[in-house]
Amino acid sequence: MKVDNLNQSLQRTALYEMHQSLGARLVPFAGYEMPVQFSGFKEEHLHTREKACVFDISHMGQFFLHGDVAGETLERIIPNYVTNLKQGQQRYSVLLNEHAGIIDDIMITKMDDGLMLVVNAACKDKDWATLQAHFGNELNMECWDDRALIALQGPTAAQTMASLNIDCSDLRFLNAKKITVNNATCYISRSGYTGEDGFEISIPNDDAENFYKQLIACDDVIPAGLGARDTLRLEAGLSLYGHELNEEITPLEAGLNWIVPKQRLAEATFLGSNVLKEQFESGVTLQRAGLLVEARVPAREGNFLFDIDHNQVGEVSSGSFSPCLNQPIAMAYIVKQFLQSDAELFVEVRQKQYPVKITPLPFVPHRYYY
């Protein structure tokens, strides 16, 4: 997880004062002053895996695209379909440039008369500009700056919501609905980025603090920061924009083949489809993979990978210590031929090399509620 320069002017979410009162360690992140931890990375991480934690993710962007043609229009710059979404269905996708590079990865939900988009905090401005540049007045777009976004994640998340008389029993993974909570209109999806069951709740800023207090007052719930959120998503094998994803990496290189339907490639009606079609037919040179570091030394972003003959064959995109596996783990982009062999590989950390083992993703099994 990258932390921004301390000297820049920072924005604050509606929960900033709440974080201060709880003694959070606040750091600059994506232009916001955000809690990186409360009780500690490891405690918050394990509590999410065992019970439930609540995360402030209000720094992320929330857009709404109105109208019946919103899906057709969006499909010009994403590789998968959204016109076939039913009311309340949600889909993961990516915005593409002409080279099939990833401008951002996004969540798209069919709600009411249009599509709700959740985008990464650091990408909000360029995502908005991308949509405007491609579609101009074809889309009636709103940016929901007046809404907070709260994630409740963990195996007891549904139990917690029920204890607050919020009925989510009808929701399955990647489904959403509009609901009233404490007289506030909320959009609740059964989703998240930890690999656990859980919910993301879009709620008006003015109502966010009261709802957050209600959540952390529940027996199984503690507040968690971005540090635990990062190690949780890494264990779950989930890509993070700016690490595994950027405008030079395509969905096929990122191992996101499942968001590129063959029929969409055949139709070739979206930006970058010609590049993806060629990669699908010829294969990619580099591909994302999981690594177990066979030492107690965590590999970090930017560390290089070498084969036994000292040839550089890859680079780490994210790495940390896994609280659940009790060893360092990482994701990296590796020359594809080495992913299909038993070759010995090493990661170089502070001018020393340590053996690594390529392993399937995720590191820790997903426990979504289907």
Image (tube, rainbow, N blue to C red):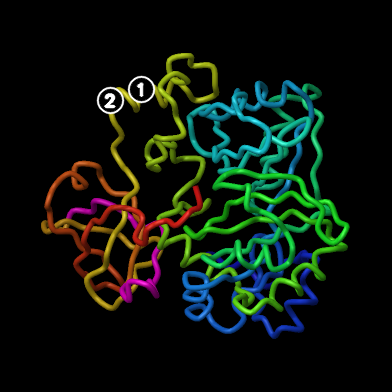
SS at badge 2: helix
Q: Is residue 126 left or right of residue 333?
A: right
| Mark 1: amino acid | Glu
SS at badge 1: helix
Q: Determine the residue positioned at 23% across, 54% down.
A: 312
Label 2, on which residue?
A: 282
Q: Determine the residue positioned at 71% across, 78% down.
A: 217
Q: Is residue 214 left or right of residue 43?
A: right
The image shows residue 147 at horizontal and vertical percentages of 80, 54
Disc 1/disc 2 C-alpha distance (Å) = 6 Å
Label 1, on which residue?
A: 278
Q: Is residue 149 highlighted in magenta?
A: no
Q: Is residue 169 left or right of residue 16?
A: left
Closer-to-camera residue (25/221): 221
Tell me whether circle 1 and circle 2 mark residues in contact (CB < 8 Å). Answer: yes
Q: Image quadrant of residue 254?
A: top left
The image shows residue 203 at horizontal and vertical percentages of 79, 56
Q: Which residues are magenta?
A: 311-327
**How busy is the neighbourhood of tag 1: few (under 14 within 10 Å), some, or many (20 plus)?**
few
The image shows residue 152 at horizontal and vertical percentages of 62, 64
